Image (cartoon, rainbow, N blue to C red):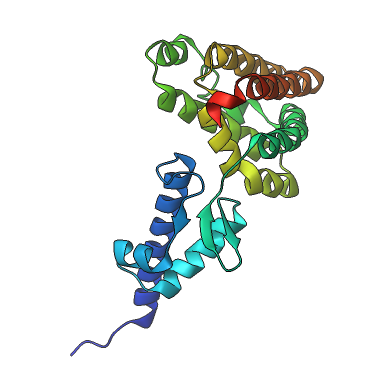
Amino acid sequence: MKSRDPMKGARKLKTKREAIFNDLRERIIRRHIVPGAKLSDSKLAEEYGVSRTVIRHILRDLERRGLIETHRNRGIFAIRMDGNYIMELLEIREALDALMARLSAQRSTPEDWKGLETLFDDECAKLIQNLDFEGYLKRVAIFHNRMVETTRNQQLQQLIDSIYDRIKMVMRRTVILPQRAERSIIENREVLKAILDKDPDRAEAINRERIRKIRENVQQYQDFIL
């Protein structure tokens, strides 16, 4: 009779827990779980086939990511972001993204960007023309992640990571606004060029102005996107 391997069981549980966390995370970001929806640990445990203890650990992780919030005596709810919340988030993002672009331009090497030089080329523009916003946002995520990595600053990386899930929720709402995606391609293309040209002042300025424009869009269309 073979003896059970407790480490194998623990690894399997960890893998399943990570998969559930990532699934719930995406469901909230994509608003498949609508903002303000109440979450039940017992129902989620039944849905995913795990214990309530496992779900409670996952919910705590999601709360640390800012994707859910606990209200005493009321329960746990998917994050609901009003206009003020989003504007405050974008103010923080403006500062962090500007610094991220500056450090990336200063510290990255050509090798870091090998294969990504044409990230926002004509093929990218066709994604927008075909209303493939998912495809476009995947390219934006690749660009963002590489910029973060090439800052070589772990503290900045942690700060950006702490708000990035909520930023993605905002991006999914603003990318469909009139001309926003088309302008975004041009802006990201210019930031990338500034980084490749080792021009930190220009990279920082463009990225800062890019976020300011997004804030203006949110203010203008908040009745439709919130």
Quadrant of residue 144 within the rendered picture: top right
User: Quick check: 17 above or below 9?
Assistant: above
Q: Position of residue 154 (x, y in %)?
A: 71, 49
Q: Furthest-left residue in view?
A: 1
Residue appearing at x 56%, y 15% in the figure? 180
Q: Nearer the viewer, residue 53 or 120?
A: 53
Of the 4 image quadrants, the one containing the C terminus is top right
- Image quarter of the N terminus: bottom left
Residue 163, horizontal then vertical, whole percent = 64, 44
Residue 32 position (above or below residue 99): below
Residue 41 vertical position relative to residue 68 in the rendered view, above or below: below
Asked if residue 36 lies left or right of residue 196, the reply is left
Give the mark count. 0
* Image position, residue 110 (x, y; %): 63, 25
Query: Which residue does the image show at 67% across and 23% down from the upper left?
Result: 219
Q: Which residue is at 65% across, 38% downward?
A: 148
Residue 223, image quadrant: top right
The percent coordinates of residue 59 (x first, y second) are 50, 62
Q: Residue furthest right?
A: 201
Residue 67's place in the image compared with 113, above or below, is: below
Foreground pick, 89 / 208: 89
Q: Residue furthest front?
A: 73
